[in-house]
Image (spheres, rainbow, N blue to C red):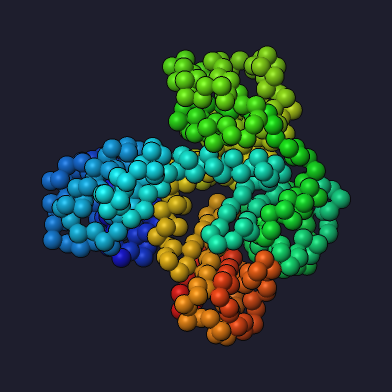
Amino acid sequence: MDIIIAGAGRVGHLLSKALCVKHNVTVIDKNGDVLQVLNDSVDLLTITGDIEDPSTYAPLLNKSFDIFIAVTDSDEANLLSTLIADDVIDAKKKIIRLKNEYFAKSSISQKLGISDAVFPFSTTAVSIKALLDFPKANNVKEFLYTDFKLISVFVQNSDIVGETIEQFVQKDCIVVGIEREKTFFIPNSDEVLQEYDLLYLFGNDQVIKNFCEIIDTKMPKSITKITIFGASLLGIEIAKALADKNISIKVIEKDNDLCMKAAEILQDSATVINSRYIEHTIFDEEQISHSDMLISTDSKDEENIIRCLEAKEKGVTKTVAINNNKQHYELMHKLGIVAARGPKANAYYAILEKMGSSSLVFEKHYCGGRATIFMRKIFPNSSLNGKKVKPFLGEYTKCFIVREGIIHSFEEKFILQEDDLIFVYLQSNLEEKVKNWIYSL
């Protein structure tokens, strides 16, 4: 495909490097030094210029592009560049990154001909909110067309270490991955559990929730008191998302202006406290040590890690660090800190997933991008109804059929029915092969 990426910040940089392997990518940014760094590392075309200036697109006139992606930090720049792109160049599909959730509820995207919009700040907030329903969980992912979820949980129960994962495999629940000492793999049912394994369970959420009680005996059984460090846009979005849960929320921020803004937005749903983070006594003075969960929302991972470690020393069992840089993901896990994707990472993965999905097949990534899920639904008018199909057989993959709330192993030919859901869990290096298979059914 021919792709234009407007903005070469962190999200644009990551997308450029990922997409240029298989596609023709053009990147536009006014920072020539950033573009030079890209040019030195990957094969793509760069244009130095302001994405809000129509003349910047002059080299692209009379050319057709499959996708235009606007991913700068400015909603206004992204919206305007999309409008200009619609007028100056021919782009079949337009994807935009936005901070302001207002645009999700308005008709602006439709009027601008935007195919897909991603809202990474609200996505991060929603992912953290899901932890309240699954307090033992490290992460929770939902899917279209089914109530089944993918939930990860650390093995923190010495009584089950040395046992096999077979006990967590039922007709409505399976283990679809293990992260162990920086390595991810898809296990067989005879795989033996080790302490601090991160198990990925897929299936009925209540069944998984019950299993989580067995797998992890250290994390809190319920979350009613939460402390959020940071009252920037992300901290406020998280507090807003949690506000309807009838829990106690404290927001700690050192910037007085941000405190005032947060207090105005959150009103009675949260207590906003102005304090310098370096004052360790705040954990005792504000009873933060009594929190069931602490969330650190700084844009620097190092600050989030330190804040979470301080909280652990003070007795807070569940700590969540916003993970902005992929290289800190494994360190957070090793330290027993929940690594929640930051807005930039969420934007990156959301755009890749939208590009990899269609009306037939849906794509998701998990385990820090090292694993992928493909799902295909058998619709009433599908030619696959009543057809016997072969599974994708290969190492590092697992295929399943979900039918009427039951998970069926898909290791031999299977006759498909209306409303069946085909799931394939795989290591991400096999993504292209599995994608070709599931589309060719």
The answer to which image quadrant residue 399 occupies is: bottom right
Quadrant location of the N terminus in the rendered image = bottom left
State the residue in front, 48 or 166: 166
State the residue in front, 163 or 35: 163
Number of callouts: 0
Identity of the residue drawn at 47% across and 78% down: 382
- As drawn, the residue found furthest toward the right would be 159
In this rendering, position of residue 126 left or right of residue 100 = right
Asked if residue 302 shows in the view, the reply is no
Residue 234: give x, y in percent of width and height: 48, 33
State the residue in front, 394 or 111: 111
In this rendering, position of residue 346 left or right of residue 37 = right
Identity of the residue drawn at 55% across and 31% down: 239
Residue 22: give x, y in percent of width and height: 36, 65
Residue 3: give x, y in percent of width and height: 29, 59
The answer to which image quadrant residue 411 occupies is: bottom right
Identity of the residue drawn at 82% across and 53% down: 161
Identity of the residue drawn at 66% across and 17% down: 286
Q: Is residue 168 above or below residue 33?
A: below
Residue 83: give x, y in percent of width and height: 22, 47
Asked if residue 380 shows in the view, the reply is yes
